[in-house]
């Protein structure tokens, strides 16, 4: 027996305000020729990467785009490509070296029309607390702002289900807390607990300290 798995939700749910904020910031960067940065924060699964992709796709003609995904072994900001205006997404900025992240405001000077979008996962980061402390300072710095993503509302989860052509279980919101990733995974599969959810939870548990 073959189990059918649905594709991803085709629409971005309850992120219109954040998308408008990014678009407005891009217009200011293009018009003023000055680099700015925005840090998109939220718990795992709140749709930071999805929002960044949708934003890049929404930019008008003439914009150059770039996406870089950081990791525990890639902790430095790359040099932005030369074309301007440029929107550059740096995924998983919680892996950044705290020292380099601390100098980000200075690095923005002289870049020209660049909008730097950093996605940063909130929550316990073993051994990376220094990075999050720097991020907390950055979002209070002129020229750098924060976009915080929270869970979807019950209506948002229902809208996601409708867009995917599924009838949501009565307990879907209670089980997922409105987290877009968990809700989408449960809607995509027929299993009550899909293997993708099991693996995601296991990865989060393995990252916790022994205590």
Image: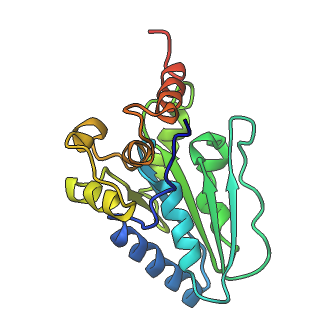
Q: Which of 202 and 74 is in front in this view?
A: 202
Could you tell me residue 28's position as x and y percent? 50, 84
> In front here: 26 or 172?
172
- Relative height, residue 68 to residue 75 (above, below): below
Question: What percent of the width, then of the height, locates residue 127?
Answer: 57, 25
- In the visual, does 32 lie left or right of 181? right
Question: Where on the picture, by quarter, is residue 99?
Answer: top right
The answer to which of 86 and 144 lies nearer the viewer is 86
Residue at image position (49%, 40%) is 132
Name the residue at 37% across, 54% down: 149
**Image coords of residue 57 (percent x, y):** 58, 75
Is 155 placed above or below 202 here? below
The answer to whether residue 53 shows anywhere in this view is yes
Q: In this view, does 157 lie above or below 95?
A: below
Task: Find the residue positioned furthest to the top.
Answer: 211
Q: In this view, does 105 lie above or below 133?
A: below
Q: How many marks?
A: 0
Residue at the (45%, 30%) spot, across then down: 124
**Position of the N terminus by quadrant:** top right
Give the residue at the far front of this rendering.
Answer: 1
Q: Say whether residue 38 is visible.
A: no
**Residue 117, located in which quarter of the rendered image?**
bottom right
Q: Quadrant of residue 174?
A: top left
Q: Quadrant of the C terminus?
A: top left
Percent coordinates x, y for residue 18 in the rendering = 38, 68
**Residue at image coords 42%, 34%:** 191
What's the colour scheme?
Answer: rainbow
């Amino acid at each position: 027996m073959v189990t059918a798995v649905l594709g991803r939700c085709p629409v971005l749910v309850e992120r219109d305000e954040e998308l408008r904020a990014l678009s407005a910031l891009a217009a200011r960067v293009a018009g003023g020729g000055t680099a700015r940065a925005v840090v998109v924060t939220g718990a795992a699964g709140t749709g930071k990467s999805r929002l960044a992709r949708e934003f890049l796709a929404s930019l008008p003609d003439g914009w150059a785009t770039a996406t870089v995904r950081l990791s525990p072994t890639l902790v430095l900001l790359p040099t932005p490509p030369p074309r301007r205006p440029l929107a550059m997404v740096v995924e998983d900025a919680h892996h950044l070296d705290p020292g380099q992240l601390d100098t980000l405001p200075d690095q923005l000077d002289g870049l020209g029309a660049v909008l730097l979008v950093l996605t940063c996962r909130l929550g316990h980061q073993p051994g990376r607390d220094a990075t999050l402390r720097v991020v907390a300072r950055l979002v209070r710095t002129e020229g750098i702002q924060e976009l915080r993503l929270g869970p979807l509302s019950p209506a948002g989860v229902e809208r996601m289900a409708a867009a995917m052509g599924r009838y949501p279980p009565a307990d879907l919101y209670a089980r997922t807390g409105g987290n877009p990733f968990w809700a989408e995974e449960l809607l995509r599969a027929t299993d009550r607990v899909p293997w993708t959810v099991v693996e995601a939870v296991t990865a989060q548990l393995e990252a916790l300290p022994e205590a």
